[in-house]
């Protein structure tokens, strides 16, 4: 009995933490709309797995107020492989690239502004899963959701 309650609470905590992380990605994505556009240079580009199943690695340099910075973030959240390929199609080391940097914190930069829809959808999913997991508890009489029995039994003489 206690083990299952503990397991559901642990799942709820993990889902809550993941939802907070996804919400942070959405917030940073929205905040990136106010980043300034700068000319950058591709410093590194490639796939972790050249057979096509890996993650893109990209590094770029850019200057703001006479100081050169290096960025590695494509966007906040996950971008689809197709989006990244379209963005970096034909780019090689030394090619120019448009970079968006935070003027108040120039170390923070992206190649794609705005929140990713997938991050927002994942946030909502994990909020839902956390809510359901926090609401389920198991006692000696079976599973209950939000304190109500999961199934109602009609006794003889009932409806």
Image: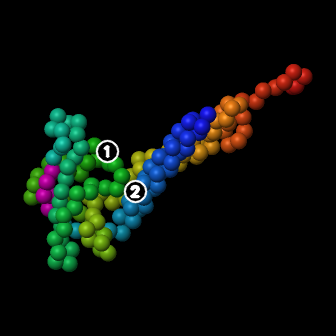
Name the colour scheme: rainbow
Front residue of 151/23: it is 151
The residue depicted at 31 percent of the width and 44 percent of the height is 80
Quarter holding residue 3: top right
Residue 52 included in the magenta stretch of the image? no
- What residue is pinned by disc 1? 80
In the rendered image, residue 54, in percent from the top left (x then y), is placed at 22, 40
Task: Give the residue pinned by disc 2.
Answer: 25
Name which of mark 2 and mark 1 comes first in the sequence: 2
Task: Look at the magenta stretch and give its main secondary structure.
Answer: strand
Please state the extent of the stretch shown in magenta in the rendering: 41-45
Locate residue 75: give its quadrant: bottom left
Q: Secondary structure at mark 2?
A: helix
Left or right, 116 with reference to 156? left
The circle on residue 113 is none
Query: Closest to the observer: 96 or 31?
Result: 31
Q: CA distance from mark 2 to mark 1?
A: 15 Å
Q: Quadrant of residue 101?
A: bottom left
Where residue 142 appears, x then y in whole percent?
Answer: 67, 30
Locate the C terminus by quadrant.
Answer: top right
Residue 50 or 14: which is nearer the viewer?
14
* Residue placed furthest toward the top: 156
Q: Going 23% across and 36% down the picture, which residue do you hit?
A: 53
Q: Are marks 2 and 1 in contact (CB under 8 Å)?
A: no
Residue at 88% of width from left, 25% of height from top? 158
* Element assignment for label 1: loop
**In the rendered image, is residue 112 in sight?**
yes
Q: Residue furthest front?
A: 2
């Amino acid at each position: 009995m206690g083990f299952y309650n503990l397991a559901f609470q642990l799942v709820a905590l993990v889902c809550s933490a993941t939802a907070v992380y996804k919400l942070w990605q959405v917030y940073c994505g929205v905040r990136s709309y106010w980043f300034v556009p700068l000319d950058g240079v591709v410093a590194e580009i490639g796939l972790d797995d050249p057979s096509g199943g890996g993650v893109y690695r990209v590094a770029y340099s850019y200057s703001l107020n006479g100081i050169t910075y290096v960025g590695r973030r494509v966007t906040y959240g996950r971008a689809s492989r197709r989006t990244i390929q379209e963005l970096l199609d034909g780019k090689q080391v030394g090619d120019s690239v448009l970079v968006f940097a935070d003027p108040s914190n120039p170390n923070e930069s992206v190649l794609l502004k705005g929140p990713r829809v997938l991050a927002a959808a994942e946030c909502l999913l994990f909020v839902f899963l956390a809510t359901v997991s926090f609401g389920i508890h198991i006692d000696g009489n079976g599973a209950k959701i939000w304190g109500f029995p999961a199934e109602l039994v009609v006794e003889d003489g009932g409806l």
